[in-house]
Image: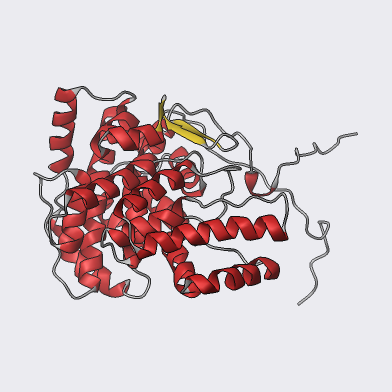
Amino acid sequence: MTTTPVAPAVPRGLAGVVVTDTALGDVRGREGFYHYRQYSAIELAQTRGFEDVWYLMFHGELPDRAAAADFAARTASLRTLPADVTEALPAIARASAVSGPLAGLRTALSLLGASAGFRPVYDIDAGRRREDALAVCAAVPTILTALHRLGQGLEPVAPRADLPHAANYLYMLTGSEPGPDEAGAVEQYLVSTVDHGFNASTFTARVVASTGADLAACLVAAVGALSGPLHGGAPSRALDTLDAIGTPDRIDGWIREQVLSGRRIMGFGHPVYRTEDPRSRMLKSIAQGFGGPLVDFAVEVEAQVQAILADLKPGRELHTNVEFYAGVVMELCGLPRAMFTPTFCAARVIGWSANILEQAEDSKIIRPAARYVGAPPPQPVPAP
C-alpha cells in the first residue's frame, strides 16, 4: 500500500521560513538591527558613501581609497542611457502617465536589457553578470528621473559624471545641483535601503534568477513586487496620514478612530521588527536636523500613536517603520511624493542585483509546492 507523503506545514506568507543561505546580510528583527555583509547598515549609512556600499555588496569588501575612486568613476560613466532607450522614454512616459515612473521603469528595463544584449545569467560567467548589473544599476536613476520629468512636461536632465551618486540623482530630478545637507540626507536614506533581508521583491528577484533568466528580467519582476502598496508604496502614504490628521488638536481623535476601527496607520508597524526600526531612528534624527513644523508634527504624531495604543491595546507596541520618517526627509529635500517609491527603488536595485549575482551561482531552481485544498479529484467531467 502506498501513501501520499504529507507536506510540511508552513506559516502563511512563508514567514520565518529559511529558503537559502546568503552572505549579503540579514535582519534581526527582535534586536532592531540589520547589516550588509559584516557591517551595520546604519553605521555604513552614517560613515560611508553610496558608491562604497554598492562596491561592498558586489565585491564583498569595502574599497580602499584608490578602489573607491575607480569604482565611482566607473559607475558614473555608465549613467548615460543607450540611444534607443532614450528615444523610447517619451512614449513610455506617456503610456505610464497615470501609473507613474515605477510602472514605466518595468518597460524601460526590458528595453535596456534587450538593447544591451543581456544574456541569461545561466549562460554567462560571474564577471559578465557583474558588468550587466553595474550597467543596469547605474542606469535606473537616469531612467526614473527622466520618466518623472517627461511626465511633468519637462525635458530630462542628463547625468553628470562629476557628481556623487545621490547628488547626481537629485540633480537629474530637479535640474539644480543640491546643497550638501539635502544630498547628504538623501544619500543616507539610499544607503539605508540598499538591502533588507529576503523581503518580497528580493525573493522575487532570486526566484527569477534561479530560472537562469537575464538580469533585466529578474529586475523587472522585482520592480513589480516593489510596486505593491504593502511593500514599497508606503512613504507617500505615511505623509498622507499626516495630511489627513492636519493639525495637532486632531491627532488624538483621528488615531483613536483608526485604532478602534481596526484600520492600519500607514508608516507604523513592520512584519519583521518587533522593536524600533533602526532606519526610522536614523531618519528621524536626520529630519530633526532640518527641523521645522512638519518634523515637529511628525514627532508629535509618533508619540501620540504609541500613547494611545498603550491606552487602548495594552501590551501591543507599534513603532514607526522606515517609510514614516523617510517621507518626511524626502519632502524636506524637495522630492515630489510621486518619486518617493521610485527613489526607494533606485537604492534597492543594488541589493536586488547583489542577490541575483549570488543566486546565479546556484543552479538549483526555486520551485516550492502548494497544498491542494479544493474538491477531491478526480471528479467525473460533466457532459456539455
Can the viewer see residue 107? no
Image quadrant assignment for residue 373? bottom right
- Does 28 sit left or right of 69 as displayed? right
The residue depicted at 40 percent of the width and 34 percent of the height is: 41
Work out whether residue 244 or residue 163 is closer to the camera in this orientation and state it: 244
Q: Is residue 71 above or below residue 111?
A: above
| Quarter of the rendering occupied by the C terminus | bottom right
Total labels: the figure holds: 0
The residue depicted at 40 percent of the width and 38 percent of the height is: 356
Residue 72, how many percent across, how many down? 17, 36
The residue depicted at 14 percent of the width and 51 percent of the height is: 80
Can the viewer see residue 24? yes
- Does 67 sit left or right of 204 as displayed? left
Work out whether residue 121 or residue 381 is closer to the camera in this orientation and state it: 121
Image quadrant assignment for residue 75? top left
Residue that lies at the very extreme toward the right in this rendered image? 1
The residue depicted at 30 percent of the width and 66 percent of the height is: 336
Residue 360, how many percent across, how many down? 41, 33
Residue 248, how many percent across, how many down? 49, 70
| Quarter of the rendering occupied by the N terminus | top right
Residue that lies at the very extreme toward the front in this rendered image? 249
Q: Is residue 303 above or below residue 382?
A: above
Work out whether residue 12 or residue 357 is closer to the camera in this orientation and state it: 12
- Does 194 sit left or right of 230 as displayed? left
Residue 113, how many percent across, how many down? 27, 50
Image quadrant assignment for residue 89? bottom left
- Does 229 sit left or right of 99 as displayed? right
